[in-house]
Image: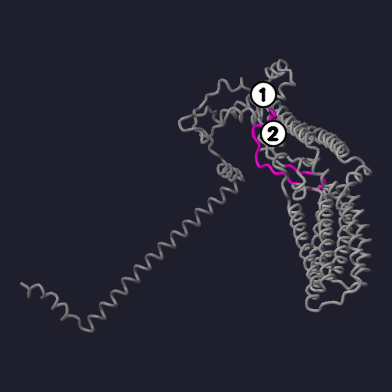
Amino acid sequence: MAFLAYEPILAFRSSLTPRNVYRLVSLHDRVVSARCSDAIALLRQNATNQRRFFSATTKDDLRSGDSSQRTKRSAKTHFYRGNTYISSARAQNDYLLGVGDLEDLRKYSVRSAYEEEGILDKMYRLSDVQARSLLVWGSQEALNRELERRKFDMEEDERRRKQLSALIGHLKKSVKDQSKKEVHLEVFGHEKERLSFFSGSAKIVTYAILSNAAVTMFKLAAWLYSGSSSMLAEAIHSFVDMLNQGLLAIGIANSIRKPDPDHPYGFSRVQYVYALVSGVGIFFLGAGASLYHGIHGLWHPPHLQSLQLALVVLGGSAIVEIGTLLAAIVQVRASAHSAGMTFREYVRFGRDPSAVAVLLEDSAAVVGVAIAGLCLSLATYQGHIVYDSIGSICIGSLLGCVAAFLIRRNMDFLVGRTIDSAKLRRIIEILENDVMVRSVHDVKAVDLGANTIRFKAEIDFDGREVARSHVSKLNLDSILAEVQTFTTVAEMEHFLLNHGERVIDVLGLEVDRIERNIKKSNPECRHVDLEIL
């Protein structure tokens, strides 16, 4: 059986002679060529038919003109609006239909994306609204004209309202500027009164400059006669004090300048700048030079002469320095009493850097004179020159400590130091006790110097109380009658916009009133910034 299955295959293999193979290939080529010819002929026939069809269509279009093209374009721009719905407010605003015009139109329940699930809005079909607007207004052109007219009237009303608002704002700004000027004069007075505001500090600084100038000359003369390092350190000390107090005088003169556009908060902090420079001068010139001469005297002891004359000069200097120190103590004590602070607290945190600087410099001067007198006495009666150099080193160390304290103190004020916590609590209580204020947040109060405080807070106002303040000034019966006459949404919108603007004006007046209360209770709060949450 297997042999019989393979028999046809063997017969086919025996027939595959070269001549038979050539015949088979030729037959295959003829079949493929015939099929390709038939396909090409069919394609040519289809192309001819398409040319004829498009030629006929073009002739028909030329005969009928552009009507078919317009039909095609209109068909392309046609929109299906059978499932488009609009609200009642939009129907009244965009198509100028009244509530009565919409009563007999069919309403559809449409799900809203802005409401909770399961709640449906009542809407109108857009095509029904458009048909009803054409019925009410007669034509689309009449509706468009009315829409344009109302738009123009609204823009004119808005333009007049903005002009009126700008005028009212200008008047409010003028009144507020005048009130600020009155408060400014009340606190600081006119230019002469402003100068007298610093009369205490200015007098102390002037007296210190004159006394240190005289003492410097006497100490230099005593050093030239005696050659004492302690006397030279005291002369340098007095000379540096004179220069530093000159800087304090310049700071006082500049701090009372009026604010300008480049410096809206004034120049009160200039005092701290010059006081800081004064502290740096004491540190480098006074302390540095005294330490240098003291250390140099240890390695190269000077030859001392006329020590009795040096002691006499130191005694006279001590009398002058003590007088200046007492005047500075009186001034600082008075300033501390007016600020409600103790003497020690005012020295550390007081706002008058000039009086405090004079106090500390004169205190160091008196102590330095005592150190110099003690060291000269020891050098005179024990015959050890090293005491004189030790006195110079001690005076330099004393000046370094005073300079470091002044630098630290004035740096804190320049960076921005907060006011006393008790005073800050009193200001916050004024805000919290006001009926318009719901809560107070982010309170900041910075001392600007020269009895000037900048206060800032974020206020959460009670909206109901603000609105009640506005409503209390209105005749509610007349407003109710006016509202009942409204027939369109535009009239209601205009009414609400007007009263909303008046509520904002009331809020601004309440902010001004609270600021005046703060400034009245705390005259040094010249800059009050209240932000509405």
Whether residue 142 is visible, yes or no, is: no
For marks 1 and 2 on the same chain, the one whose residue lies earlier in the sequence: 2
Magenta-highlighted residues: 431-455
Query: Where, quadrant-wise, is the N terminus in this rendering?
Result: bottom left
Q: Is residue 281 above or below residue 17?
A: above
Is 340 in front, or is 425?
A: 340
Residue 196 figure quarter: top right
- Per the image, the residue denoted by label 2 is 429
Is 98 in front, or is 118?
A: 118
Pinpoint residue 465: horizontal percent, then vertical percent: 67, 26
User: Quick one: SS at disc 2?
Assistant: helix
For residue 4, the mark is none
Give the foreground label among 1 and 2.
Answer: 2
Q: Amino acid at mark 2?
A: Glu
Measured in 3D between alpha carbons, the distance from the residue under mark 1 to the one under mark 2, in whole angstroms, is: 48 Å
For residue 488, the mark is 1
Q: Residue at x 50, y 31 (%)?
A: 110
Neighbour tally class for label 2: few under 14, some 14-19, many 20 plus, Cα within 10 Å:
few
